[in-house]
Amino acid sequence: MSFRGKLNFLIVVLLSIIPMSYPFAQQFASQIVTVASDGSGNFTTIDPAVACLGSAGGQIIVKPGIYPPATITSNIWLQGSGFTSIIQVPAGSQANGISILNATNVRISNLKVIGNWDPAVAYTGPSYTSANGIRIFNSAFVTIDGNFVTQTYFGGITADTSVNITIFNNRGIGTRDNVTAQRKGKVMGWDQKAAPM
């Protein structure tokens, strides 16, 4: 194997272990709330659960169901129940499925995010600030793992002007742009997989 081949192999190996060994260990408050669209949890949508946890944060468990787009603040772990926990952008909306804006210490895991991209309809919103599956802006120490993102106009996952972002084990199909799109900032631990689930 050539030097370049060995170097590429080493980089791939290092990137594959970063999400498990990166030196920041995310800590979340012990408060746990449940979101269930059928009314069996503490809340029926995600945004009120985020507001309830306040600046201390905590864990939000999202039960199977379909939920509107959400904005996540600092110190929140939003954990779905697999791909039956669905965040769906309504028809006609140019919202992001999940927005993480000006936040620190966030984790999004085990959710399905569905946009409303229709190739026959012209998009009129600002580039890369809306119509993403998961958008991270001006944030730090964010982990995005185990999600499935589909039908988004721009990136399935975008990170812009953010640092210490770990994105791994996510899948996407049917997005107009890359499954994972990075603009300004530093994204660590990329492991994007463009395959259906």
Image (cartoon, rainbow, N blue to C red):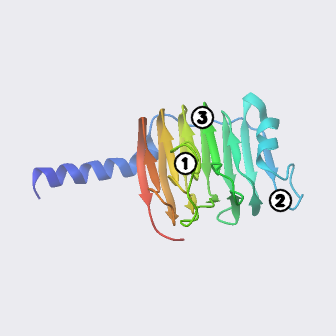
What is the secondary structure assignment of the residue under circle 2?
Answer: loop
Residue shown at 48% from the left, 48% from the top: 167
Task: Describe residue 92's horizontal placement relative to residue 121 as left or right.
Answer: right
Task: Check the picture and name the quadrant holding the C terminus.
Answer: bottom right
- What amino acid is at disc 3? Asn
Contact between marks 3 and 2 (CB within 8 A): the answer is: no
- What amino acid is at disc 2? Ser
**Residue 55, x across and y down, in percent:** 73, 28
Marking on residue 169: none
- Precedes in sequence: disc 3 or disc 2: 2
**Residue 122, x across and y down, in percent:** 56, 58
Which residue is at the far right?
39
Residue shown at 87% from the left, 62% from the top: 38
Spatial distance from mark 2 to mark 1, Cα to Cα?
Answer: 23 Å
Marking on residue 144: 1
Residue shown at 82% from the left, 37% from the top: 52
Mark 2 closeness class: few <14, some 14–19, many ≥20 residues within 10 Å: some
- Precedes in sequence: disc 2 or disc 1: 2
Task: Check the picture and name the quadrant holding the N terminus.
Answer: bottom left
Name the residue carrying label 3: 105
Name the residue carrying label 2: 37
User: 45 or 91, which lies in front?
Assistant: 91
What is the secondary structure assignment of the residue under circle 1?
Answer: strand
